[in-house]
Image (cartoon, grey):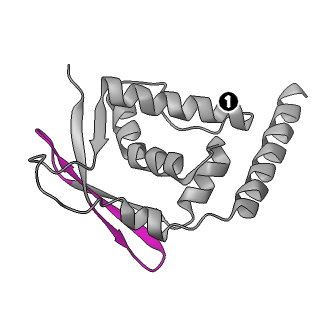
Amino acid sequence: MAAARWRIASVTEGRETWLIHYEPLGDGEAFAASWPKEAFEIRMAEHGLDSLDEAIEVLLYTPLLHAMHADGHPDVMPVLEGDAATARARILGQVAACKEQYAEVTTTPANGRARTPDPLRTLHDGAHIDPVRVATMRLEIDRYMLARERADKE
């Protein structure tokens, strides 16, 4: 089965959220996903992501990973993993598997010819990443994971 394709039709910035509109390129129904503005920093901390581009890609694919999981793929849910490198490898592997086996996200216009602005430009221009806050969140995640590991050994 070929992977389904979804186009990001638009991104709307709210006061505290981002609303991302998906259109099917083929079968399927349009849908939208809403994320708090802090979601990029949170995903960067949770999954050890290195850049805003990686965080955007992970957030764009998160609804599709949930659908893929619901359709019987048990190992594609973003879960908190041990160290940042392991978490990063896991989530990027899940996104790659989704692209290959299930669904792909694009910003290309449906006809491929129209000259429309890139809807992700809104995210690139409006999302603000505070590296200190990301590092602080990662330290808290590491502290939690270490405490959980210790509790499991007891």
Residue 100 sits above or below residue 77 on the image? above
Residue 25 sits above or below residue 36 on the image? above
Task: State the residue in front, 115 or 53.
Answer: 115
Q: Quadrant of residue 102?
A: top left
Which span is picked out in magenta? 10-30
Q: Which residue is mark 1?
A: 86
Q: Position of residue 57 (x, y in %)?
A: 44, 46
Q: Quadrant of residue 119?
A: bottom left
Q: Amino acid at mark 1?
A: Thr
Q: Is residue 28 magenta?
A: yes
Residue at 31% from the left image edge and 29% from the top image edge: 71
Q: Is residue 27 magenta?
A: yes
Residue 72 sits above or below residue 15 on the image? above
Q: Classify mark 1: residues with Cα within 10 Å, few (<14), some (14-19) or many (20+).
A: few
Q: Position of residue 56 (x, y in %)?
A: 46, 52
Residue at 17% from the left image edge and 45% from the top image edge: 24
Residue at 80% from the left image edge and 43% from the top image edge: 142
| Secondary element type, mark 1 | helix
**Where does the C terminus fall, quadrant-wise?**
top right
Outermost residue to the top: 1
Left of 12 or right of it: where is 114?
A: left
Task: State the residue in front, 60 or 120.
Answer: 120
**Where does the N terminus fall, quadrant-wise?**
top left
Residue 76 sits above or below residue 11 on the image? above
Q: Position of residue 81 (x, y in %)?
A: 67, 34
Left of 77 or right of it: where is 151?
A: right
